[in-house]
């Protein structure tokens, strides 16, 4: 944030021959004195959220050398807020496979945390880590939005009761530019501080600031935007992949954040799922059959074609979304895991009737915490 001093000080500088300058807020070292903070570091993928929190780790190494009054200012009982512990999501193990196990890793580097790093898959495992490390006063919870909703209240209770500080570098918006999930919403409600980060739009022709995470697939070098109903959570690494089943991510501005299929999802796909939930699965079966075998006659193709080809401002790259495999499977995952419109028996029926990819479905259902034996 920058401001121009137009008051008396600014006018004095002008009278002395100095220009009016934009004064930017400097980066401050982490405040280990104030207890009970719940800090969200938010931004799109690649904006430097984890790198931002790595500075806290480095600051703690300096702060721990302080003595006397500095110690009393940063402690409550046996809790020392200069002591930092990093908690990674168990879902995140594949992101940086080449880094040491004790690394707080980010794009371009890492900090080794020794015994002060651990993994948790839910708020209950985090609660165990808190109990096993009672002297730690500052906790970095990486990708907190991937945890269950309870984590927001666990951190709020611990910070109020024991003065613990929590720093959460996390996504708040998903690739659809919507609040990531209920956990993200509750983290926002219970936060005391928010640090928003941005990044350059990664489109090759653009230098605009970007707030959004963009999901796409690479097929024979072509960019294929993810459809709106692509599975919400897909667990994978940070390396670029040329596989229509495994997505890539980058940051994009409004103009270059392509998201085909949103209108289709709510105008066609979800209503078909609602019919299936009421017992009439035939219309959904017909559309999924087209998606799986002859997409050119599907209602999805008609929807995208009318919006991105037969229009005043065509955008052919949006049509590349139809080149990815397993579109019918993606639609089923969306209806089952996010909308709860299909029963397990209906899902199995559709898979068998259409001969769908069971391996792909099993992985995506598991990623979205709705595993099912197919």
Image: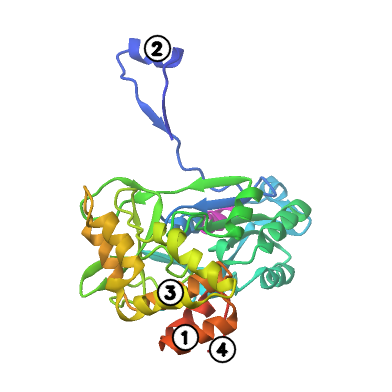
| Among the two numbered marks 2 and 1 on one chain, the one whose residue lies closer to the N terminus | 2
Marks 4 and 1: which is nearer the front? Answer: 1
Residue at screen point 50% across, 64% down: 271
| Among the two numbered marks 4 and 1 on one chain, the one whose residue lies closer to the N terminus | 1
Question: How much space separates mark 4 and mark 1, taking CA atoms?
Answer: 12 Å
Give the magenta-colored segment's residue range: 56-65
Marks 2 and 1: which is nearer the front? Answer: 1
Question: How much space separates mark 2 and mark 1, taking CA atoms?
Answer: 75 Å
Q: Assess disc 1: are there few (<14), some (14-19) or many (≥20) residues with their C-alpha within 10 Å of its C-alpha.
A: some
* Percent x, y of residue 251: 35, 56
Mark number displayed over residue 288: none
Quadrant housing the N terminus = top left
Q: Main secondary structure of the magenta part?
A: helix
Q: Which residue is mark 3?
A: 330
Q: Assess disc 4: are there few (<14), some (14-19) or many (≥20) residues with their C-alpha within 10 Å of its C-alpha.
A: few
Q: Which residue is mark 4?
A: 373
User: In terms of secondary structure, where does tag 3 sit?
Assistant: helix
Mark number displayed over residue 12: 2
Within the image, what quadrant is residue 62 found in? Answer: bottom right
| Among the two numbered marks 4 and 3 on one chain, the one whose residue lies closer to the N terminus | 3
Question: How much space separates mark 4 and mark 3, taking CA atoms?
Answer: 17 Å
Q: Assess disc 3: are there few (<14), some (14-19) or many (≥20) residues with their C-alpha within 10 Å of its C-alpha.
A: many
Q: Which residue is mark 1?
A: 351
């Amino acid at each position: 944030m920058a401001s121009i001093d137009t008051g008396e000080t600014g006018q004095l500088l002008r009278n002395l021959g100095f220009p009016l300058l934009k004064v930017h807020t400097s980066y401050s070292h982490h405040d280990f004195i104030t207890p009970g903070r719940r800090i969200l570091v938010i931004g799109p993928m690649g904006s430097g959220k984890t790198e931002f929190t790595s500075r806290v780790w480095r600051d703690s190494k300096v702060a721990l050398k302080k003595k006397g009054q500095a110690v009393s200012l940063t402690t409550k009982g046996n809790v020392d807020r200069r002591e930092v512990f990093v908690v990674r999501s168990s879902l995140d193990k594949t992101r940086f496979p080449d880094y040491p196990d004790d690394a707080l890793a980010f794009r371009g580097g890492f900090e080794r945390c020794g015994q002060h790093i651990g993994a948790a898959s839910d708020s209950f495992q985090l609660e165990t880590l808190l109990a096993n490390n009672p002297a730690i006063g500052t906790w970095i919870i990486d990708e907190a939005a991937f945890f269950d909703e309870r984590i927001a209240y666990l951190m709020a209770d611990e910070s109020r009761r024991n003065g613990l500080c929590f720093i959460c570098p996390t996504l708040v918006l998903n690739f659809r530019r919507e609040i990531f999930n209920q956990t993200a919403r509750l983290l926002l409600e219970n936060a005391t501080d928010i640090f928003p980060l941005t990044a350059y739009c990664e489109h090759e022709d653009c230098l605009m600031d970007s707030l959004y995470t963009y999901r796409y697939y690479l097929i024979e070098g072509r960019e294929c935007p993810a459809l709106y109903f692509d599975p919400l959570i897909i667990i994978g690494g940070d390396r670029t992949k040329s596989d229509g089943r495994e997505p890539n991510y980058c940051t994009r501005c409004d103009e270059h954040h392509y998201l085909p299929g949103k209108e289709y999802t709510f105008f066609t796909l979800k209503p078909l799922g609602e019919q299936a939930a009421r017992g009439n699965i035939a219309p959904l079966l017909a559309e999924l059959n087209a998606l799986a075998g002859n997409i050119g006659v599907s209602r999805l193709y008609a929807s995208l074609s009318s919006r991105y080809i037969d229009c005043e401002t065509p955008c052919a790259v949006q049509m590349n979304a139809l080149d990815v495999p397993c579109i019918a499977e993606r639609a089923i995952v969306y209806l089952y895991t996010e909308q709860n419109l299909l029963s397990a028996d209906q899902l199995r029926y559709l898979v068998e009737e259409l001969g769908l990819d069971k391996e792909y479905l099993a992985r995506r259902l598991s990623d979205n915490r709705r595993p099912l034996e197919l």
